[in-house]
């Protein structure tokens, strides 16, 4: 058996084509959406992701504003950048690239953002709205995962989903999305304190691996036919090393490539949040 490829690159291209048309329509009504990014330090992965976000903006016609600060930036320096983007009329939405250097208080910085400009859906107000299941910008990676599964007809209703990793950008937020009545999946959130990870993964219809541990999910842990999504972005010798071992393709029914799976979906859903916020502002 060889798994069906969950092609994030191709699915993201379709989403971006739709967004390009919506940006054109917004511009015809005098609105130019603009995405800001705040990047602190020189983490190689973050540099690549932020550069990709600006390329995507250019592709669909969104203006972009890039704020890069050195690794030594103080809390006050980052606060000043956030205040500027909150006040800037040309920035309709923005993100603070994570993770931030350890000396910075991430939570305080996210809280300082204007929730109406939070293009990542990670501001506590917007995550709170997601908990309450009312309209909010959705965190990009979890939203991308849901849309990718839907694109390939992988059933969510009643599915047993095991998410490995409890970080806010993926695991924790994905649990909230998948347990909404519209998705109606049953979610088990596994983490470093989980007693028997293999036992949980083995009974899952859908496995989302977001632990950042290369090769953590092996073929013997996967139920035949399951959908497996690899969100791992470790770098080994400069190359991406996912959380899913290569031989999982022989057992799984559906599998994301990595790169080319969840990453491009994350970026497309960021653009989608920017466009939606601009459309909202016109209502
Ligand atoms: N503020 C945020 N920070 C982070 C988020 C986030 O959603 N918001 N998620 C991750 C990183 N991330 C987005 O910022 C991200 C990860 C991967 C990709 C991507 O397109 N990956 C490519 C490969 C690129 C490469 O060569 O490394 C792929 O998978 O094909 C985009 C965005 C943590 N931080």
Image (cartoon, rainbow, N blue to C red):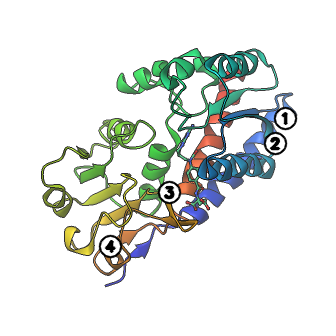
- Nearest-to-viewer mark from 3 and 4: 3
Assess whether mark 2 and mark 1 are in contact (beta carbons under 8 angstroms).
Answer: yes
Q: Name the residue under label 4.
A: 253
Closer-to-camera residue (283/276): 276
Q: Which of marks 1 and 4 is nearer the N terminus?
A: 1
Residue 116 percent across, percent down from the top left:
61, 20
Ligand 1 contact, mark 3 (Cβ < 8 Å): yes
Q: Is residue 283 visible?
A: no
Q: Which of marks 3 and 4 is nearer the N terminus?
A: 4
Residue 49 percent across, percent down from the top left:
64, 50
Look at the numbered disc 3 and give the secondary structure of its residue.
Answer: helix
Q: How far apart are marks 3 and 4 (CA)?
A: 17 Å
Q: Is residue 16 visible?
A: yes
Neighbours of disc 3 within 10 Å: few (<14), some (14-19), many (20+): many
Q: Name the residue under label 2.
A: 24
Q: How far apart are marks 3 and 2 (CA)?
A: 26 Å
Q: Which of marks 4 and 2 is nearer the N terminus?
A: 2
Look at the numbered disc 1 and give the secondary structure of its residue.
Answer: helix
Residue 124 percent across, percent down from the top left:
46, 21
Q: From the viewer's perspective, tell me whether residue 110 is left or right of residue 182.
A: right
Quadrant in the picture for residue 61 = top right
Give the farthest residue toward the front.
72
Q: Earlier in the sequence, mark 1 or mark 3?
A: 1
Q: Mark 1 points at which residue?
A: 27
- Nearest-to-viewer mark from 1 and 3: 3
Question: What residue is shown at x 45% (from left), y 66% (from top)?
Answer: 256
Q: From the viewer's perspective, tell me whether residue 197 is left or right of residue 148.
A: left
Q: Name the residue under label 3.
A: 262
Q: Distance between the residues labelled 1 and 2?
A: 5 Å
């Amino acid at each position: 058996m060889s798994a069906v490829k969950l092609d994030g690159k191709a699915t993201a291209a379709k989403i971006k084509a739709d967004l390009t048309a919506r940006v054109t329509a917004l511009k015809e009504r005098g609105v130019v959406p603009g995405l800001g990014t705040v990047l602190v330090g020189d983490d190689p992965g973050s540099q690549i992701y932020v550069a990709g976000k600006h390329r995507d903006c250019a592709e669909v016609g969104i203006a972009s504003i890039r704020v890069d600060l050195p690794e030594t930036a103080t809390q006050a320096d980052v606060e000043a950048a956030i205040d500027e983007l909150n006040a800037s009329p040309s920035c309709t939405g923005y993100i603070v690239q994570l993770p931030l250097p350890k000396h910075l208080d991430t939570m305080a910085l996210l809280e300082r953002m204007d929730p109406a400009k939070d293009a990542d859906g990670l501001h506590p107000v917007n995550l709170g709205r997601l908990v309450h299941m009312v309209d909010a910008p959705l965190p990009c990676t979890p939203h991308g995962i849901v849309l990718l599964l839907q694109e390939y007809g992988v059933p969510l209703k009643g599915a047993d989903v095991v998410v490995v990793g409890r970080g806010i950008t993926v695991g924790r937020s994905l649990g909230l999305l998948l347990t909404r009545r519209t998705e109606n999946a049953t979610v088990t959130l596994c983490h470093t304190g989980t007693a028997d990870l293999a036992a949980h993964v083995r009974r899952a219809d859908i496995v989302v691996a977001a632990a950042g541990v290369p090769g953590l999910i092996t073929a013997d842990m996967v139920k035949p036919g399951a959908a497996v999504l690899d969100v791992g972005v470790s770098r080994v010798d400069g190359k991406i090393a996912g959380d899913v071992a290569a031989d999982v393709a022989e057992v799984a029914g559906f599998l994301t490539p990595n790169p080319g799976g969840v990453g491009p979906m994350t970026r497309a859903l960021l653009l989608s949040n920017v466009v939606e916020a601009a459309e909202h502002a016109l209502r």
